[in-house]
Amino acid sequence: MADILKTVTAGQVDVDRLPRHIAIIMDGNGRWATRRGLPRTAGHKAGAETFRRIATYCKNLGVQYLTVYAFSTENWKRSADEVGTIMGLLKRYLQEAVATMERDNIRLHFFGDMSPIDPELQALARETDEITEHLGADAFQANVCLNYGGRDEILRAARRFAEDCAAGKCAADELDDALFSSYLDSAGIPDPELIIRPSGELRLSNFLLWQCAYSEFYYTDVLWPDFDEAELEKAIVAYQARDRRFGGVKK
Ligand code: FPP
């Protein structure tokens, strides 16, 4: 395993202490393109390639889950051209996934409210869900957040829980962390130990608000299209140097 590491940092990735789940806010595509005199959409195309590369690297390293923020509930405010390009890139990725995920043993799952998404894209997502169900639970899994917002996810979960209570399937006083988590888009998936945001912005932007309770955050100025395997390793090395106490005290 260690021979695939591309470490350029003074530290070393400890492959026995990898985060099981890494989440990434794929930020900086627009600035990457503008700096090159290209349209913003060129940045998203480059960003989609970076996603493929980083997902492959996470799988090869032995990280089990990679969750990426592809399109937020607020991203509809962007131009029709930009929204159309991002949806087109997702469609292409899903078409490729339908053809290759079984062969490559890669599970794919969506977080977010898919109801306003193009029906063709929704149908492809249903196809990838079906393939995912047949793949072993220990296979690498990519989660793509599409029309996703952390607050929206929590509200949808709360509504579904209230409906189940009204239908007599459960009671309000039964609700605890584990039960509420089972209503979220991330049901059954461990919380991310590491959340990475490239491009120099120091915000969470409505990403995984419930799941980030004890996540370690890593920020870098590198723009997402320039983020590579070595940058991922730097983030993992930084994560492995953190003292994670979960509200307790060091033993
Ligand atoms: C944020 O950068 C990026 C997005 C809103 C879109 C991300 C989408 C992709 C990378 C393409 C599709 C993904 C997959 C999984 C195939 P920004 O545009 O806000 O950058 P800026 O802050 O520099 O303007």
Image (cartoon, rainbow, N blue to C red):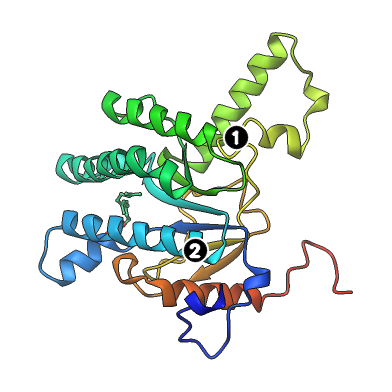
Question: Between 101 and 142, which is closer to the camera in this rendering?
Answer: 101
First of labels 1, 2 by sequence position: 2
Ligand 1 image position (quadrant): bottom left
Looking at the rendered image, the quarter that the N terminus falls into is bottom right
Q: Quadrant of residue 231?
A: bottom left
- Which disc, if any, is residue 60? 2
Q: Up-down: is 132 above or below 250?
A: above
Q: Secondary structure at mark 1?
A: loop
Amino acid type assigned to the residue bearing label 2 in the image: Asn
Give the image location of residue 2, x and y in percent. 56, 77
Q: Is mark 2 within 8 Å of ligand 1?
A: no
Classify residue 218 as left or right of residue 50.
right
Residue at 56% across, 60% down: 63
- Asked if 221 appears above or below 180 in the picture, the reply is below
Q: Residues within 10 Å of mark 2 (few under 14, many from 20)?
A: some
Kindly identify which residue carries mark 1: 184
When asked about the image quadrant of residue 39, the answer is: bottom left
Dot in front, 1 or 2? 2
Q: Is residue 49 above or below residue 91?
A: below
Verify CB contact (< 8 Å) between mark 1 and mark 2: no
Residue 6 horizontal/vertical position (percent): 45, 80
Position of residue 22 in the picture relative to residue 246 (left or right): left
Q: The residue under label 1 is which amino acid type?
A: Leu
Q: Position of residue 64 (x, y in %)?
A: 58, 55
Determine the residue located farthest toward the right in the rendered image: 251
At x 43%, y 77%, the residue is 230
User: What's the residue at 22%, 60% (across, down)?
Assistant: 43
Which quadrant holds the C terminus? Answer: bottom right
